[in-house]
Image (spheres, helix red, strand yellow):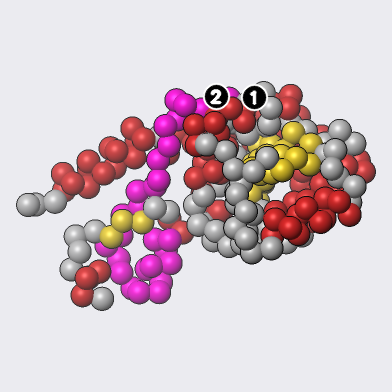
Amino acid sequence: DYLFNNAYSIISPSKWFAELIKSEIGIKNIVVIPNGIFIDDYTRCDINNIKNILYLRSFHRFHDPATLVKAIGIVKKEIPDIKLTLVGFDEKDGTYNECVKKIDELFLKDTIIIQGPIEKADIPLLSKSHALYVNCSIVDNTPVSTIEAMAMGMCIIGTNVGGIPFLLNDNIDSLIIEPKDPKILAETIIKIIMDKKLSLSLSKNAYKNSKQFGWYNVVDKWENLFNEIDY
């Protein structure tokens, strides 16, 4: 408590974490400065690729890619040419194997590609072939991968956990749903794909919202904070 109470400011990377610190510890001198990305490195996706879905998280139970795999099995019955690319490394907690098994059980080998981890510099290239991003976590803070998807103008589906509702704006730049429900997730995916007006709006607003996370804006926040300090 001494350390926190005598600090000029406590820096939080998200509004959610700031609220958590306030409620749990009672600290009030908190400044939110988000993680930044180089916005200019990312190119807008082609909304015509809306049937190509991207998952860009590690294979971990907290990120729950298995629910997404199950949802794709439902979506495929209505949209046969749906595609999903799973990009991320195996956290070795059994989630990767669960996804592989479920893909096999649901006969989705021609529908779902497990790409594995990629280099950070290659992430912007994903915008060339994907236009719908799903963050289906059951525990989360403010994932940079979701911010990157926003910077690529992708339509985004997020779950109502942790910092996600603080990062995204439901029905404006994303659709937010409850976690671990493959049926609701499938319905939400289908809704975005079938409603072109909605997909265009989500894409436009996600791209617009991502600008606040550009490094130029983030550096300004740090500079403003340092300028307030009386050395």
Query: Does the magenta portion include 16?
Result: no
For residue 162, which numbered disc appears in the image?
A: none
Relative vertical location of residue 151 with respect to residue 229 in this rendering, above or below: above
Residue segment shown in magenta: 17-44
Amino acid type, callout 1:
Lys
Q: Are marks 2 and 1 in contact (CB under 8 Å)?
A: yes
Question: Which quadrant of the view contains residue 139?
Answer: bottom right
Does the rendering let one see residue 145?
A: yes
x 61%, y 46%: residue: 88
Q: Position of residue 155 (x, y in %)?
A: 66, 37
| Residue 133 relative to residue 214: left or right | right
| Residue 75 relative to residue 34: left or right | right
Write down the residue under mark 2. 43
Q: Find the distance from the CA under tag 2 to the CA under tag 1.
A: 8 Å
Is disc 1 placed on a helix, strand or loop? helix
| Residue 116 relative to residue 36: left or right | right
User: Reading the chain from its start, which is encountered first: label 2 or label 1?
Assistant: 2
For residue 128, which numbered disc appears in the image?
A: 1
Is disc 2 placed on a helix, strand or loop? loop
Instruction: Report the front residue among 34 and 100.
Output: 100
